[in-house]
Structures are given as C-alpha cells and as structure tokens.
Amino acid sequence: MSASSLSAAVLLAVATAAHAFAPLKPLSPAHLSTSSLSLRGAAAHPLAVSGRRNAISSLSMASLERTVLREGDGKTFPQKGDSVTCHYEGRLARGNTLFDSSYDYGEPISFQIGEGQVIKGWDQGILDMSLGEKCKLDVPPFYGYGPRGDPPDIPPMSPLVFEIELLQINDQKA
C-alpha cells in the first residue's frame, strides 16, 4: 500500500469513527430529554484534557480546552454515571454564532455524565468541573459533531465553544 493510499485509509477511518459518536441533534426544547441526546456509539479518541482538576490543555488542535470562568466549590466533582444538571450556551467558534442555549428554554438540562448521552466534549470536560463552577469549553470537531456536523445550524468539522454551568450533581445542588 502506498503512503498516499494509507493516508487516505486513515482519514476515512477517522471520519467514520467521528460519525459514530455525533449526537442526533443539537439540544432544543424538543430535545431536552436524555433519550433524544443519545449517541450512536463511543468515540475511539483518547481524553485530551489533563486528568488534573482545573487543568487547561493546549496540546494540539484536537485537544479539549477548558477555562474556568467562575470557581465551583473545589471539592465536589461528578463521577461517570452521575446525574448532572447544567445550564449552557453553545456557539460556533468561527463567527461566534449562537446555535443553542438552555437559558433560552428557561430550564437547565439533566443527563448522566460519561454515558454517551451528550457529545464527547461534554462527557469529558464536565468530569473536571466542580459543583457550582462555570467554564468555557472549547470543543474540537471530533469531540463535537465531527465531519457530519448537524445541519443546518452546525456545519461539518465545526469547532464549538460552550459556556457550561454545573448546577447539580445527583441530589447535591450548588
């Protein structure tokens, strides 16, 4: 196999894997139930965020980056499988266009973290947030909607920016 054939095969495999974890639709009033947020599978990409709390990674364009905007309690963190409740606002990184916001719906969203009910960037990034924290989460395409995008609001290969506020973990409120 030539180098160009191998490169093409690798790119096709990455694009196919990304399609496997893109959510069906962005969040909207009709999509606030966790069943509508289901993914089609888990991503094969490793976690690009450092395991340290409040760490910001800028290892590559493919890394998830989290910036703390307001500190949380610093001691209560969600674990995989916990029910979390968040307010959020999602924008396209290019052009800063708002595509979704729980504030517009007047209620936060609840889901099980780390269980594939939301995009991979949320499943990974929210695990490092403490209760009450508000952060900016820069989500590269393969941790978001990938090469498929979610037309008409989210074009293919769109980096996304979310402001996320962690309001509740299981029964514990901020």
Image (cartoon, rainbow, N blue to C red):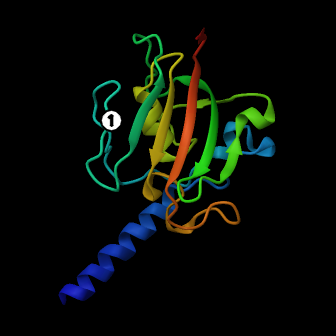
Instruction: Residue 26: tell me if it is visible.
Output: no
Is 112 left, or right, of 63 in this rendering? right
Q: Looking at the picture, how far across and down is residue 28, in whole percent?
A: 75, 45
151 lies above or below 135:
below
Instruction: Residue 59: tell me if it is visible.
Output: yes
**Closest to the observer: 87 or 34?**
87
Image quadrant holding the N terminus, namely bottom left
147 lies above or below 61:
below
**Closest to the observer: 53 or 17?**
53
Q: Can you identify the residue that label 1 sits on?
A: 56
Q: Looking at the picture, how far across and down is residue 130, in whole percent?
A: 45, 18
Q: Which residue ends up furthest to the front in the rendered image?
A: 95
**Closest to the observer: 69 or 74?**
69
The residue that appears at 44% across and 12% down in the rendered structure is 76
**Closest to the observer: 139 or 12?**
139
Q: Which residue ends up furthest to the left in the rendered image?
A: 2
SS at mark 1 in the image? loop
38 lies above or below 16:
above
